[in-house]
Image (tube, rainbow, N blue to C red):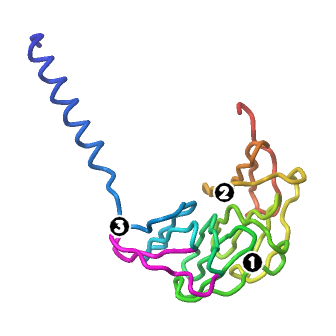
Amino acid sequence: MKPHLRLLFRACALLFLTQAASAQWSATNGPEGGMLSAILHDGTYLYAGGSGGVYRSSNNGDAWTAANFDMWPFTYVFSLASNGSVLLAGTSFEGIYRSTDKGVSWTDGSEGIPQYAQVRAIVAIGTRFLCSADGSIYLSTDGGSTWTESAAGLPASSGIEAFAVAGTFVYAGSFGGGVFRSSDNGTTWVETNNGL
């Protein structure tokens, strides 16, 4: 290929890639005026959680409405999870709020976790939920109504900040302790930090 054609081809490719990359993100119309820590799509609605509670959008973020009418007015939501029929919101110092009507109403879902717990992460695994609360992991087998500690194999105060599900494994990322893996839906954990 001639040098000037090669240069023209590269310039066109760069222009195309630049435009394609910039077209992938666009601002939504809110929620405004605060920090957001969680975002979730449950197949019907898009939810955002942060300062001020939970917000919901039915049109891909073009418009948002507050979905936190039963929450304390200054609730900060760290995490959101849904299994399709139950929506959970993990909060700072208020434990877990639970909704069975897509965020229209909320009830306390904190039975079994420490009072005033910070719930930094929640994940749905089929009909089960896992949450991180005050340095440990808790498991719910009844849709987030009650919780039992499920930290076998974790160090004390492991500081779990995030969960991921991949096939038959559940992963928990910790603050300073690396990654832990469960092959039994969060009942027991092993450290998996080789190379980290």
- Residue 181 placement (x, y as % from top left): 74, 51
Camera-nearest label, 1 or 2: 2
Was residue 67 drawn as part of the magenta stretch in this picture?
yes
Image quarter (top left, top right, bottom left or bottom right) of the C terminus: top right
Q: Residue at x 79, y 43 (%)?
A: 177
Would residue 27 be found to the left or right of residue 44 on screen? left
Residue sitting at the far right: 156
Which three-letter amino acid code belongs to the residue tagged 3?
Asn
Q: Which residue is mark 1?
A: 141
Residue bearing the label numbered 3: 29
Residue at 73% across, 45% down: 179
167 drawn magenta: no
What is the spatial separation of the Cα atoms under label 2 and label 3, in whole angstroms?
Answer: 29 Å
Please give the range of residues in magenta: 53-71
Helix or strand or loop: what does disc 3 sit on? Answer: loop
Q: Nearer the viewer, residue 19 or 141?
A: 19
Please provide percent x and percent y for residue 171. Answer: 69, 53
Label 2, on which residue? 163
| Sequence-first disc among 1 and 3 | 3
Q: Are marks 1 and 2 in contact (CB under 8 Å)?
A: no
